[in-house]
Image (cartoon, rainbow, N blue to C red):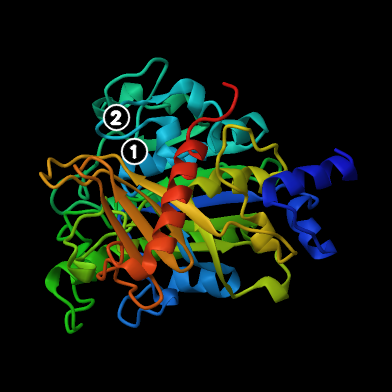
Amino acid sequence: MDRRDFLKRCAAAGGGFLFSNESLELRIGARRPNIIFLLTDDQRWDAVGCAGNEIIKTPNIDALAAGGTLFENAFVTTSICMASRASIFTGQFERCHGCNFNSESLLQSSFDNSYAVLLRKAGYRTGVIGKFGFAVTEEREPSSVWKDISKLPTDQFDEWYGYAGQGNYFPEGEGGKHLTEIMGDDAVEFLSGCSGERPFCLSISFKASHKPWGDYDPAYSELYVDAPIDDDMKNYYRLVTGVDVVIGRIRRELTRRGLAEETVIIFTSDNGYMFDDGGHGTAKDLLYDASIRVPLVVYDPRAPRRLRGRRLKEMALNIDFAATMLDMAGEKIPESMQGRSLLPLLSGGEYSWRNDFFCENNFPRGDPEGRLSVAVRTDEWKYIRYYEQEPVYEELFELENDPLETVNLATDGNYQQILNSLRQRCDEWLQEAECNYEK
């Protein structure tokens, strides 16, 4: 690839940004980086110390942020486990990949363009640990087949440590090892087969911090005893701290094996959790920020000192991760991916970036009021359309003054111009989020 082709790819992926020499080294260094992608379950954006939470203990995640980049505005485009995980692998909106609990499995043809398959084709040693979260089939099948290990792509990774379905925090029974700790063992085992001769990509999907929150590792039972939070949140935090401890273990193993300086670590979650923010209940599928906003830290040990410890306000999405990992590896980003590489933001160059994004809830829960919805979020505004209700119900929130989204301005005549503008933008997004590429 010559310089002209390289710059063309940069412009296509990043919206017209410029690189410094240091930034170029992050993309086309002497070696392609190793990548570890860490995904928790149901972890709110603020359930981590580096986000300003003074109660929770996450020193290892905080250390990644101190040496890397913390995205203060990271979101998922669908706040449901299965759909979000399919979006992460494929870089696609749900209405494009079509995989959710109430719909169907992910097609093999879509998974063929996932970051995991493409990196393996590019020579990466790939592995999966933990909750995979969706089935991959040649033809569409009921989504329930995600509980069948034969419907998971076990042969499409070099090493498979995943499991079907939701999993159990104590798979060895009462008194046995906690699942989070077992996953740490699996990570160490995977790393034992890695060397500097072949780059690797390891995807680790923790069950924590999903319910049942009371099934935390007993080793952390003394934590948060006196914290001014209720018992559910204490147990939730214990699960998160258990993940943090394993992350520290993984980093020590990377150092012990001489792999730390070439390994990028990405930490995030598949969706947030409401915990009754704004009086909206405890669901996680609604399109309020507490549900769609997630933690995101990207740690790149190759980054120059001036790029360490930054906090970025640009909006990052779960559909961006696949393009980012491919971009870091110097691989072409397929047309099927609807997200954008985060590398321009991580590299500190000049760039243009999104000023809004689309998200959707296509998962009915039998709510008579109707929850199916689509939304557009900008830096300042959130517009939500509950399209299954008759007549259609809309919400409009001014986020700076109403971060918990409790004051609906959609019926206030003073905001009709903004409402109409976001209605139109939502209609545009409904078209853009479809699979507008040649299959």
| Residue at (30% x, 56% y) in the render | 42
Residue 146 is labelled as 2
Residue tagged 1? 133
Residue 125, label in figure: none
Residue 272, position as x, y percentages in the image? 32, 58
Q: Is residue 75 above or below residue 116?
A: below
**Rendering coords of residue 144 (x, y %):** 24, 28
| 124 or 284: nearer the viewer | 284
Determine which quarter of the picture holds residue 26.
Answer: bottom right
The residue lying toward the viewer, choosing from 77 and 63, is 77
Q: Residue at x 40, y 49 (%)?
A: 359
Q: Looking at the picture, does residue 132 appear above or below residue 277?
A: above
- Quarter of the picture holding the N terminus: top right
Three-letter code for the amino acid on which mark 2 is drawn = Trp
Q: Is residue 73 left or right of residue 41?
A: right
Left/right of residue 415 with respect to residue 6 in the rendered view:
left
Task: Kindly state the secondary structure of the residue where label 2 is placed.
Answer: helix
